[in-house]
Image: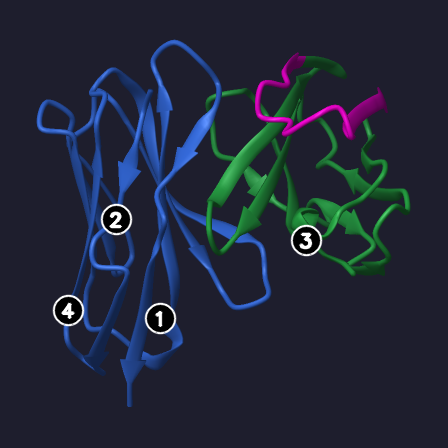
Amino acid sequence: DAGVIQSPRHEVTEMGQEVTLRCKPISGHDYLFWYRQTMMRGLELLIYFNNNVPIDDSGMPEDRFSAKMPNASFSTLKIQPSEPRDSAVYFCASSLRGRETQYFGPGTRLLVL
Amino acid sequence: KQEVTQIPAALSVPEGENLVLNCSFTDSAIYNLQWFRQDPGKGLTSLLLIQSSQREQTSGRLNASLDKSSGRSTLYIAASQPGDSATYLCAVISAAGNKLTFGGGTRVLVKP
């Protein structure tokens, strides 16, 4: 298996623009997680899905952030409108079961100017 | 609310020395504890997972111990090598949920 795939790997955009991050989990994994990593706050869970259904979105910072999982092999995290403080590395991870080992993608490095 | 702390934030050792990385958590009601490695600009790689009922877990030169009652875990890396240079993060899953709570990580440099 190719592992968790994320795209794009790098994104530079201007404040106010819409940003869409994409993730393909490992085939057969029922859980998908979105994280954000910054120097100040470390790794934070934003939202996670079980069988394509959002279970806990309490980590989503505000309404500008939304996430979807239309099918078992694809998820998106959208920021609209983007702000400079959204600059971070966004990771997607998947696991076979919710409490077991999570496999992380390479991350998307986002810079909002 | 669960809080996970890793001290020190950075560590530098000469090659061949054993590494000892510490992790503490405030709520002992955990399901499991996981250790990850992160290389610069890369994602996280799972190293070891210890279930709450276990005291330790081993993989090659890596050994992780868990003392749930005192809220501590230690990752030992024997005979360190320059390739072990990376950031090591620990994370816990609470007994009641599926969410990983991460520590801030320890950045390790192994000097040749």
Q: Pointer 4: residues within 10 angstroms few (<14), some, or many (20+)?
A: some
Question: Circle 2 sits in a helix, a strand or a loop, which is it?
Answer: loop
Name the residue: 85% across, 36% down.
Answer: A80
Amino acid type of the residue tagged 1 in the rendering? Asp
Marks 1 and 4 share the same chain: yes
**Does label 1 lie on the same chain as label 3?**
no
Callout 1: 10 Å neighbours few (<14), some, many (20+)?
some
Disc 2 to disc 3, C-alpha distance? 24 Å
- Chain A representation colour: green
| Image coords of residue B17 (percent x, y) | 15, 76
Q: Amino acid at mark 2?
A: Gln
- The residue at which mark 3 appears reads as A87
Q: Nearer the viewer, mark 3 or mark 1?
A: 3
**Which-is-in-front pick, marks 2 and 1?**
2
* Mark 2 and mark 3 on one chain: no
Question: For the point 59% across and 66% down, which residue is it?
Answer: B41
Residue holding disc 2: B6
User: Along the polypeptide, which appears first: circle 2 or circle 1?
Assistant: 2
- Which type of secondary structure does the marked residue at label 3 adopt? loop
User: Marks 4 and 2: in contact by CB < 8 Å?
Assistant: no
Q: Chain of mark 3?
A: A
Q: Chain of mark 2?
A: B
Span of residues in magenta: A55-71
Image x and y of residue A49, in percent: 68, 19
Work out whether mark 2 precedes mark 4 in sequence or the reverse, and give the earlier one.
2
